[in-house]
Amino acid sequence: MISYRGDRPQELRILLAAFVVSLLFFSAAAGQAQKMAHSTTRFSGESAYELTRQYIAAAPHRWIGSPDHAKAEQFIRSHFAPEAANGTFETDSFSASTPAGQLSMKNFIVKYPGKKDGIIVVASHYETNYPLRDINFVGANDGGATSALLMELGRYLRTHPPQGYSIWLVFDDGEEAIQSWSDRDSLYGTRHLAAKWSQDGTIKKIKAFLVADMIGDKDLNLDRDSNSTPWLLDLLATAAKNTGHSAYVFKNETTVMDDHLPFRQRGVPVLDMVDLDYGPPTQEHPEGGYHHTALDTLDKVNAHSLQISGDLVLEMIRLIDQRG
């Protein structure tokens, strides 16, 4: 039996309360530390979503030649400052003949050397639609989320360097038409890059060219694109099964004109990871009412879809390495 004198019970209650508060504090701190450690060991959809928010806030109207296009370039450069410092960040500047005259454009290539001879390219365009420059079009899903996806992939690859083929992240410019879509008025950045890499021999080393486009949509389902290489489509189905994401692929079959075409035309295996079904369809936009409208805003994107897309890209890389 324990007896107390005077106000000892009150003192003990205070000490006990202090102990409980301390325990809760250290538990929360440990949880946060664990969460931070976890976020550095895997691709984070939450980080990709936050990068999307920051990117479109810093450079909302990124049409070619605009002040925000220059801000977008700077945002990408700043994110990859460590790669620039070690010489694995490349700026590919070029001039393109367009319906609006000669326009200066830039592709950015971020290289993560692997242990096998060959390259897997993951590409996305970073600009916004030029004909929509007079409306409040920020392209949260169409260019914003995929740019953020590549940035988050870069963060992951810093601490998880490729064990198979080298991985190159390509932020390509001028995917959108300057006036109206045609073979000549579109895909400026990847047409330039495919021609350049054909001339210097790089294209022969590319094992797969993967495009990410409009993959932040809250209602995500990646299309089966008939312009993609069949074995890569099969591999995407396997990647979806392996990651538990089969419900998010191949609801729709489409034939997509996108950044993979210049490489497909040169015999490179290509895959367009794209979800064209973006928002309720309208007469003007049967593929989805948010596509190429001022409704393509951050609230239409979420971390969950970016997590799925990141998981699929990384699993595709693993499967391509395994296949080769």
Image (cartoon, rainbow, N blue to C red):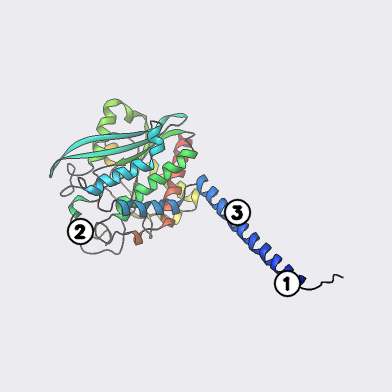
Left or right of 34 in this view: 65: left
Q: Residue 114, relative to residue 136: is it above or below?
A: above
Q: Name the residue beneath numbered marker 1.
A: 10
Q: Position of residue 225 (x, y in %)?
A: 32, 48
Q: Name the residue beneath numbered marker 3.
A: 30
Mark 2 Cα within 10 Å, few/some/many (few <14, many 20+)? Answer: few
Q: Residue at x 41, y 37 (%)?
A: 82
State the mark number for residue 101.
Answer: none
Distance in Å between CA atoms under marks 2 and 3 = 47 Å
- Say what amino acid the circle numbered 2 marks: Ile
Compare marks 1 and 3 and give the one earlier in the sequence.
Answer: 1
- Can residue 261 be seen by looking at this rendering? yes
Q: Residue at x 76, y 72 (%)?
A: 9
Q: Residue at x 31, y 51 (%)?
A: 58
Compare marks 2 and 3 and give the one earlier in the sequence.
Answer: 3
- Say what amino acid the circle numbered 3 marks: Ala
Q: Closest to the observer: 143 or 242?
A: 143
- Can residue 228 be seen by looking at this rendering? no
Distance in Å between CA atoms under marks 2 and 1 = 67 Å
Judged from the image, the secondary structure of the residue bearing numbered disc 2 is: loop
Judged from the image, the secondary structure of the residue bearing numbered disc 1 is: helix
Q: Residue at x 69, y 68 (%)?
A: 14
Compare marks 2 and 1 and give the one earlier in the sequence.
Answer: 1
State the mark number for residue 135.
Answer: 2
Label 3 near label 1: C-beta < 8 Å? no
Quadrant of the image containing the C terminus: top left
Left or right of 131 in this view: 118: right
Q: Quadrant of residue 289?
A: bottom left
